[in-house]
């Protein structure tokens, strides 16, 4: 008599036919928002697993690895994984051998079997959970896309439209266009003193940083950073973009005055003239963008004395003497140039010191003669 052959059989869980609808909606999302279907499906499976664990009739919070969710275009099904034992101590996670063989005829002690979960009653909760996950997933994906889009634009010059001002004085602006548009914050500390920001007007801003926050990425921009001046000159001066002229350093007191040191990267180029432009058009465009901020453009030099002399422009300098063993120098100027060399409230000398990195001691010629 032929022996009956036992075949391995695993019970199938009832499928809820919402898989096709979910996939169709995810495909639409991928086209509209660029959110991958696989990403959202994994999020949905995780959410449905957690929802089932918390909504069990026995109120047992079973481990996530014991719940298997199958979500595809064919439908949605769920299994609960239990361990085969002789005596059941934990009904939620264990099953007797005889009962296990109703689901898998080859089940043995110590092995696991997958028990189909009837999710017909779970359908409403599943639908609500799916909706919440989709909404949250869209938000997170959009935040991630904004972060990735603008993280690469840190230290760049962008055009922004002013949206509003908050009670703390921070200005919120819109940068980018179309689908790439995003909000950014121009903090009060990054605003040019005395500059007026009218709602709807457009300004140039320098992207300081893009950082992740609890509510999504935050793009921080500035109007006071020295590199704003650098980027504006790069935009206005082809010689800088082509590498013929190099900006070596910038010292700035936003809204008042900036000193910029430049050098020619090739022979026959006037670096200052290139930045000033025909009839002062290039530097004039930068000054206009910065609301009338004065800009001194000087030639950078490897010789510290020559560099300091140029940095004190527009004042005339008689001589510059380096102090041995120190990063400092003594400067001699005509008596009638002293106030110009020092500047209002010491601004000219202060900016020159920051530009060159040297401590500058300025004296008039008459005082030097008396000391001698």
Image (cartoon, helix red, strand yellow):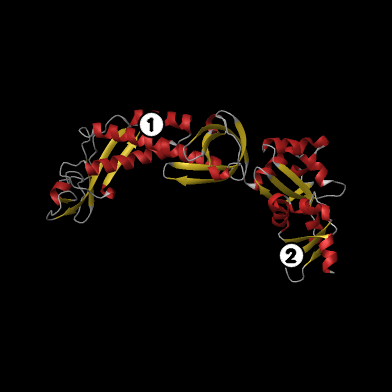
Q: Where is mark 1, residue-wise?
A: 23
Which SS class for mark 2? strand
Where residue 115 appears, as percent x and y from the top left, is 21, 43
Which residue is most to the left? 87
Residue 47 can be seen, yes or no: yes
Q: Which residue does the image show at 23% across and 54% down from the upper left?
A: 111
Tell me if mark 2 has few (under 14), some (14-19) or many (20+) residues whose alpha carbon lies within 10 angstroms of its own: some
Q: Residue furthest right?
A: 268
Q: Position of residue 219 (x, y in %)?
A: 52, 42
- Residue 8 visible? The answer is no
Q: Secondary structure at mark 1?
A: helix
Viewed as shown, does residue 348 lie left or right of 75?
Answer: right
Packing grade of label 1 (10 A; few <14, some 14-19, many >=20) is: many
> Disc 2 vs disc 1: Cβ atoms closer than 8 Å?
no
Q: In the rendered view, tell whether residue 341 sits above or below residue 154.
A: below
Q: Position of residue 256 (x, y in %)?
A: 67, 44
Residue 286 place in picture, x, y as percent: 71, 38
Quarter of the figure with residue 121:
top left
Rendered-image quadrant of the C terminus: bottom right
Q: Nearer the viewer, mark 2 or mark 1?
A: 2
Q: Which residue is mark 2?
A: 328
Please tell me which residue is depicted at 33% across the width and 40% down the height of the picture.
Answer: 45
Judge by depth and name the residue closer to the eye, 137 or 14: 137
């Amino acid at each position: 008599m032929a022996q009956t052959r036992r075949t391995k059989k695993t019970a199938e869980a009832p499928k809820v036919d919402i898989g096709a609808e979910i996939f169709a909606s995810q495909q639409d999302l991928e086209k509209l928002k660029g959110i991958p279907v696989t990403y959202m499906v994994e999020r949905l499976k995780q959410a449905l697993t957690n929802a089932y664990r918390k909504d069990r009739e026995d109120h047992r919070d079973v481990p996530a690895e014991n719940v298997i969710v199958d979500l595809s275009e064919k439908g949605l099904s769920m299994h609960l994984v239990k361990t085969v034992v002789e005596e059941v101590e934990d009904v939620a996670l264990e099953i007797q051998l005889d009962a296990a063989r109703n689901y898998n005829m080859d089940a043995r002690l110590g092995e696991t079997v997958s028990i189909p979960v009837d999710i017909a009653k779970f359908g409403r909760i599943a639908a609500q959970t799916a909706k919440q996950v989709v909404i949250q997933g869209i938000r997170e994906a959009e935040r991630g896309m904004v972060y990735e889009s603008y993280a690469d634009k840190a230290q760049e010059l962008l055009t922004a439209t002013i949206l509003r001002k908050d009670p703390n004085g921070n200005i919120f602006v819109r940068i980018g266009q179309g689908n790439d548009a995003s909000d950014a914050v121009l903090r009060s500390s990054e605003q040019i003193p005395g500059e007026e920001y009218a709602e709807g007007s457009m300004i140039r801003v320098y992207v300081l940083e893009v950082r992740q926050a609890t509510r999504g990425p935050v793009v921080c921009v500035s109007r006071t950073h020295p590199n704003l001046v650098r980027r504006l000159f790069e935009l206005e001066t082809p010689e800088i973009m082509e590498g013929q002229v190099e900006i070596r350093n910038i010292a700035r007191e936003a809204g008042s005055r900036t000193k910029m040191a430049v050098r020619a990267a090739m022979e026959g180029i006037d670096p200052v003239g290139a930045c000033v432009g025909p009839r002062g058009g290039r530097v004039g465009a930068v000054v206009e963008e910065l609301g009338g901020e004065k800009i001194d453009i000087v030639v950078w030099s490897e010789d510290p004395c020559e560099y300091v002399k140029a940095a004190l422009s527009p004042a005339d300098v008689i001589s510059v003497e380096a102090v041995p063993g120190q990063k400092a120098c003594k400067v001699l100027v005509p008596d009638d140039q002293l106030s110009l060399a020092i500047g209002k409230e010491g601004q000219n000398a202060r900016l020159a010191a920051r530009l060159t990195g040297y401590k500058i001691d300025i004296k008039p010629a008459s005082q030097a003669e008396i000391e001698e």
